[in-house]
Image (cartoon, helix red, strand yellow):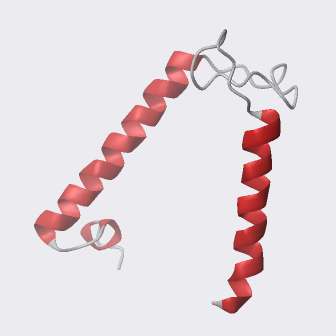
Amino acid sequence: TEAALPGIAALVVFSGLLELVLWKDDANKDPGNFGDPLSWGESINVERSYELNNGRMAMLAVLGQFVAELVTGKDAVEQMGLK
């Protein structure tokens, strides 16, 4: 809708600024390692491999939901009997 266009534009501009200013690629770093631009490292100490494995499991879970929806014709909420 027309009401959503300014919000979408703001999100695109904000994410573009983050990509261009804060999250620059560095040949000396691993892919995806953007450092700690907001200095949250002291309070958030999660190991990289744990976070990667968590993301991989989430992607497999979503893939499983898609396959189950294709097979049964029901979305995830309907399959659990919540709808």
Q: Quadrant of the N terminus?
A: bottom right
Q: Residue furthest top?
A: 28
Which of the pair 72/31 is nearer the observer?
31
- Residue at horizontal 82 percent and vertical 38 percent from the top: 21
- Residue at horizontal 29 percent and vertical 50 percent from the top: 63
Which of the pair 77/26 is nearer the observer?
26
Give percent across and percent down for residue 57: 38, 35
**Residue 13 against residue 37 in the figure, above or below:** below
Q: How many marks?
A: 0
Give percent across and percent down for residue 27: 64, 13
Asked if residue 81 lies left or right of residue 35, the reply is: left
Asked if residue 26 lies left or right of residue 68, the reply is: right
Which of the pair 71/30 is nearer the observer?
30
Q: Residue furthest bottom?
A: 2
Asked if residue 34 lies left or right of residue 50, the reply is: right
Q: Quadrant of the C terminus?
A: bottom left
- Residue at horizontal 73 percent and vertical 29 percent from the top: 24
**Residue 73 against residue 18 in the figure, above or below:** below
**Residue 41 against residue 77 in the figure, above or below:** above
Give percent across and percent down for residue 39: 88, 25
- Residue at horizontal 80 percent and vertical 21 percent from the top: 41
Which image quadrant is residue 70 in?
Answer: bottom left
Give percent across and percent down for residue 9: 74, 70
